[in-house]
Structures are given as C-alpha cells and as structure tokens.
Amino acid sequence: MQVEALIFDVFGTCVDWRTGVAREVAAATGAKGLEIDSVAFADAWRGLYEPAMQEIRSGRPYTDLDALHRENLDTTLGRFGIATHFNDEERAALNHAWEKLPPWPDVVPGLIRLKASRIIAPCSNGSIALMTRLARYGALPWDCILGAGIARAYKPDPRTYLAACDALRLEPAHVMMVAAHNDDLVAARDCGLKTAFVARPLEHGTGQVTDLKATSHWDIVAADFPALSAHLDLRSHD
C-alpha cells in the first residue's frame, strides 16, 4: 500500500538531544561559576526519561513530558550536588533546554523533500508545546503535531501510534513510522504501520552501542532522510 504519511520519532532521530542539552546546561552552570561535566549531566537527565514514562504506563495519571523533565531535572541537580544553586525560576528556564535541540544536518532538507509529496509529523513522547517550540527552533517543517500529546500515552503504548493514524484519518498501513530506535519500530509495526530505520550512531556519543544498525527487516533502511525520500520515490514508481 502507498505511504501517505510519515510520522517521526524526534529525540535522537531528528534532533541531537545530547549536544543541545549539554550546551544549555554548560551555559546555565557556567554563568554561576560551576564546573561540571555538562555532557554527563545531559546523559543523567536523559537517563531518567524512560523510568519516568514507565510510571505513567504503570498507572500514574498522564503527566506531560515537560513536567516529567522538570521532575527529572530536580533529581539530576541533586545527584550532581548543585541543587542549591538553582531556584525555581532558574530550573524552569533550564527545563526549556529540550526545546532548543539542533536537528541532525540531513533532517531539514530531508523533511522538506518528503513534505513535497506526503504528510509529515512528529510522533514523539514530547508534549505538543515542546514539539511546537522545538520545530520553531530547528525549522522542522511539520504539517501537524502528533504523538503522546494527543494520545495521552507514551510510546511504545499502541495508543500513541494508532492515535496518530486516527488523527490523520489514515489506516495504519498507509502510515510509516521513522525512527533510529529499533524498539520504536517494533511497536509501530505491531500496530500495522510501515517502518523505516535511519541510524543515528552518535546519539549517545562515540561510545554508543545500541541501535547502530537495523535489527529487523524494516520496510526501509536508509542512511539519512534524503535517502529515505529517494527510497519512497522509487517505490511509488514501482
């Protein structure tokens, strides 16, 4: 079946969260004369992301990612021994780091090319507010914002993928999930979506050991977003 829409994982697949968060942390701590490893801080902050969402999947009332990030920031500041240096207003400002993440170099030109013939939208665990501001920051040309914010559920909960399809009034077989994370694609495929894997071998830095390659027979495996567009163009002419 023809792919009419592509929905995208964002953190790691479209944007370099590690570099972006570390940059904002370095600026915030440097302004206070604090010397910390900002990359290690970014990793630690991100490391609380999955456990926080698992609480929601396990029965905690739905809480958007902005609030979870803020809770996790408080924990991370404490672990690094610098909690007393940041008041509530400063913590709120630092929490906006997740809205200022640089896209990988191929992303914007690739999305523009894909948008010419298909609907494109994020299917992220980020809130609608976060995804909107991140799109404005990085010039991500989405047609709309989908994902956890409309599903009130976090991937890999099937509701997240299916709510995106429902919002577009498309059957899952006409929608392709694009991600740099094999487990994301497993969940999407189980819901009937098409799948595309694009590796981001530096998402976690030079020592990354996960998601370096496709671990299943996805519908498309592409080197980057322009290559993904080329694959889809070829298939549409078959």
Image (cartoon, rainbow, N blue to C red):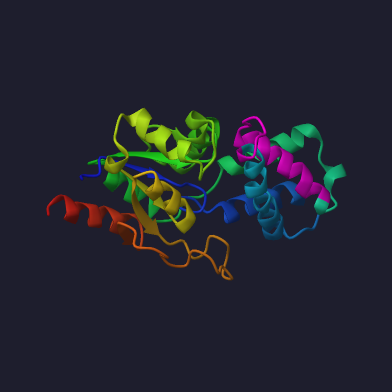
Number of callouts: 0
Judge left or right: residue 97 versus residue 160.
right
Q: Residue 36: in sight, yes or no?
A: yes
Q: Which of 218 and 128 is in front in this view?
A: 218
Residue at the left extreme?
Answer: 238
Q: Does the magenta stretch include residue 224?
A: no
- Give percent across and percent down for residue 29: 76, 50
Looking at the image, residue 92 lies above or below residue 102: above
Q: Residue 33: in sight, yes or no?
A: no
Judge left or right: residue 93 versus residue 174.
right
Q: Residue at x 62, y 42 (%)?
A: 53
Looking at the image, residue 223 lies above or below residue 61: below
- Give percent across and percent down for residue 7: 38, 42
- Give percent across and percent down for residue 233: 19, 52
Q: Which residue is drawn at 51% across and 50% down?
A: 102
- Give percent across and percent down for residue 104: 45, 55
Looking at the image, residue 75 lies above or below residue 205: above
Q: Which residue is drawn at 22% across and 41% down?
A: 117
Quarter of the figure with the C terminus:
bottom left
Q: Nearer the viewer, residue 59 or 96?
A: 59
Q: Does the magenta stretch include residue 66?
A: yes
Quarter location, residue 231:
bottom left
Q: Which residue is drawn at 51% across and 53% down?
A: 12
Judge left or right: residue 2 versus residue 38.
left
> Which SS does the magenta portion mostly show?
helix
Looking at the image, residue 99 lies above or below residue 61: below
Q: Which residues are the magenta region?
A: 57-78
Judge left or right: residue 54 versus residue 199.
right
Quarter of the figure with the N terminus:
top left
